Amino acid sequence: MSTNTLEKLQARFDPQAAQGMNEIFQFHFSDAGSHYLDIQDGTLGIHEGEHDDPSVSLSMSTDTLKGIMTGDINGMTAFMTGKLKATGNVMLATKLTSLFPGE
């Protein structure tokens, strides 16, 4: 995943939306390896690699993530059409857009 996309996530992060959350979002990017987001009570850490116990794991391309974040791609549609695969606490994935609101 380009550091550019990760930096955008960092910049768009809404600490208010993450109050009281202690979750690990694991991303497996078909075109950029694995990264995970560590959200701990209003803070965000972005790490390369695999977490051994993620709350939810999401598999997609970086373009799909960008599309979901910008609102060009509906996350549920991406899931239904197989562009996005999720395991674990799948409902957490629906919080991504509130954690990283649009411009």
Image (cartoon, rainbow, N blue to C red):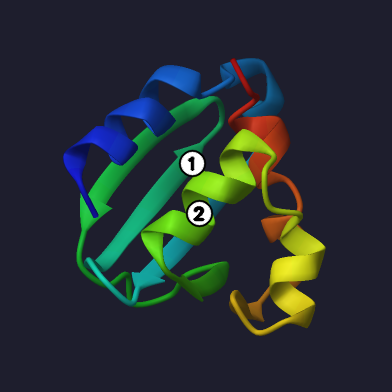
Relative depth, front residue between 7 and 40: 7
Instruction: Tell me whether circle 1 and circle 2 mark residues in contact (CB < 8 Å).
Output: no
Q: Residue at x 73, y 81 (%)?
A: 81
Residue 52 appears anywhere in the view? yes
Residue 64 placed where, x, y %?
52, 60
Residue 41 placed where, x, y %?
56, 31
Q: Which disc number belongs to residue 65?
A: 2
Residue type (three-letter) at the residue carrying disc 2:
Leu
Total count of labels: 2
Residue type (three-letter) at the residue carrying disc 1:
Ile
Relative depth, front residue between 28 and 45: 28
Q: Is residue 44 left or right of residue 102?
A: left
Alpha-carbon span between mark 1 and mark 2: 18 Å
Badge 1 local density, few (<14 within 10 Å), some, or many (20+)? Answer: many
Which of pointers 1 and 2 indicates the residue nearer the eye?
A: 2
95 versus 30 height, above or below: above
Residue 49 placed where, x, y %?
20, 67
Badge 2 local density, few (<14 within 10 Å), some, or many (20+)? Answer: many
Question: Looking at the image, is mark 1 or mark 2 earlier in the sequence?
Answer: 1
Residue 17 placed where, x, y %?
70, 25
60 versus 11 height, above or below: below
Residue 62 is drawn in which quadrant? Answer: bottom left
| Secondary structure found at label 2 | helix
Quadrant (top left/top right/bottom left/bottom right) for the C terminus:
top right
Q: Is residue 63 left or right of residue 55?
A: left
Q: Residue at x 37, y 27 (%)?
A: 8
Q: Which disc number belongs to residue 8?
A: none
Quadrant (top left/top right/bottom left/bottom right) for the N terminus:
bottom left
| Secondary structure found at label 1 | strand
Q: Which disc number belongs to residue 39?
A: 1
Relative depth, front residue between 41 and 45: 45
